[in-house]
C-alpha cells in the first residue's frame, strides 16, 4: 500500500508526471488510484476519463455524512460507497477522482468538507498492491493544510529555473513539518545547458529522473489524448518509476 504525492510550482508538469506514472504502474499490475487535488481539474482528462464530479461539490452528502446533531461533526464519515460511485476508471483500470476546492476557515475551525475529503483519502487504499497518486494543488497549498500527511513519498516536479527551485525549498520545509521523509525530484522540460546542470547540482534530494523538453506533450494536449498513448518520453518515465519502486521497497 503506497501513497505518493506529486507537488511543484504551477505549470511544471505535475499532472503529466502523475498521469505517466499512473499508467506505468497500472501496466505493471498495480491497482492504481489517481486523485486530482487541484482546484483546476485536469487529471481526469489527461487520463482519458473525461469529467469527474468533484467530491467537494457533494454538499448534500457532506451535510448528511459529516454533520451530527447540535452542531457536532463526525470525524470519520462513511465514504466507501461515495468512493465507488463518484470515481471513474479508464481503459487501463486506473481509478480517477477529483477532490475539488476546500474553503479554509479560521484557525481552529473544523471544516466538514475537509473531514469528508480526508476520509476519501483514507478509504482510497486498502489492498497490498495498491498505489495512490495525489496530484497536488499548484505550489504548496495542500502541503500547508496537511492534505498530504501520511504519504510514503513526495515527488517534487521542477523545471530549469529559479522560481521552480525556490518552490522546491518551500516544499522541503513543509514536507518535513508534516513528517514526509522521502522526497524525490523529477526535472521536467529539461534542456541541457550549463545553467541547468548547475541548478541540478544544487538539489539536495535524489533526482529520480530527467524528462527532456518534448513537443510530444504539446501535441497530446492539442489532440486531447493521454500522452502515454503516443509514447511521450516513456523511457524517461520508466526510469523514474523504477527508482520510485526501489526507494519504496527499501523502506
Image: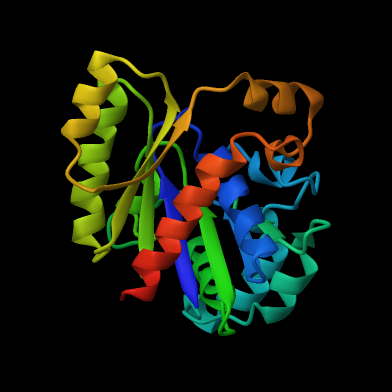
Q: Is residue 192 visible?
A: yes
Total residue callouts = 0
> Residue farthest to the right?
91
- Compare residues 116 and 88 and report the one nearer the observer: 88
- Compare residues 251 and 77 and report the one nearer the observer: 251
Above or below, 91 against 222 in this view is: below
Percent across and percent down for residue 172 are 22, 48
Seen at 51% across and 75% down, the residue is 122
Percent across and percent down for residue 14 are 50, 40
From the viewer's perspective, is 226 left or right of 112?
right
Pick the quarter of the image with the C terminus. bottom left
From the viewer's perspective, is 216 left or right of 125?
right
Seen at 67% across and 59% down, the residue is 59
Percent across and percent down for residue 184 are 32, 51
Q: Is residue 98 visible?
A: no
From the viewer's perspective, is 43 left or right of 152?
right
Seen at 73% across and 28% down, the residue is 220
Percent across and percent down for residue 175 are 26, 55
Above or below, 36 against 232 in this view is: below
- Compare residues 66 and 120 and report the one nearer the observer: 120
Question: What is the image's colouring?
Answer: rainbow
Q: Quadrant of residue 247?
A: bottom left
Amino acid at each position: 500500500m503506497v501513497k505518493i504525492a506529486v507537488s511543484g510550482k504551477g505549470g511544471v508538469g505535475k499532472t503529466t508526471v502523475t498521469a505517466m506514472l499512473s499508467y506505468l504502474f497500472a501496466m505493471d499490475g498495480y491497482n492504481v488510484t489517481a486523485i486530482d487535488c487541484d482546484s483546476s481539474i485536469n487529471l481526469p482528462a489527461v487520463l482519458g476519463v473525461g469529467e469527474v464530479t468533484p467530491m467537494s461539490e457533494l454538499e448534500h452528502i457532506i451535510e448528511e455524512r459529516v454533520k451530527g446533531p447540535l452542531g457536532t461533526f463526525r470525524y470519520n464519515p462513511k465514504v466507501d460507497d461515495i468512493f465507488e460511485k463518484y470515481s471513474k476508471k479508464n481503459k487501463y483500470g486506473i481509478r480517477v477522482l477529483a477532490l475539488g476546492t476546500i474553503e479554509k476557515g479560521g484557525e481552529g475551525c473544523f471544516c466538514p468538507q475537509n473531514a469528508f475529503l480526508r476520509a476519501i483519502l483514507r478509504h482510497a487504499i486498502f489492498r497490498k498492491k495498491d498505489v495512490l497518486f495525489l496530484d497536488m494543488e499548484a505550489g504548496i497549498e495542500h502541503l500547508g493544510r496537511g492534505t498530504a500527511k501520511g504519504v510514503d513519498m513526495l515527488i517534487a516536479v521542477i523545471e530549469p529555473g529559479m522560481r521552480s527551485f525556490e518552490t522546491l525549498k518551500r516544499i522541503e520545509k513543509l514536507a518535513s513539518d508534516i513528517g514526509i521523509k522521502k522526497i524525490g525530484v523529477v526535472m521536467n522540460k529539461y534542456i541541457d545547458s550549463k545553467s541547468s546542470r548547475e541548478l541540478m547540482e544544487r538539489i539536495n534530494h535524489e533526482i529520480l529522473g530527467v524528462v527532456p523538453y518534448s513537443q510530444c506533450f504539446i501535441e497530446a494536449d492539442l489532440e486531447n489524448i493521454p500522452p502515454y498513448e503516443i509514447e511521450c518520453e516513456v523511457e524517461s518515465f520508466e526510469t523514474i518509476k523504477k527508482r520510485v519502486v526501489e526507494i519504496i521497497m527499501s523502506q
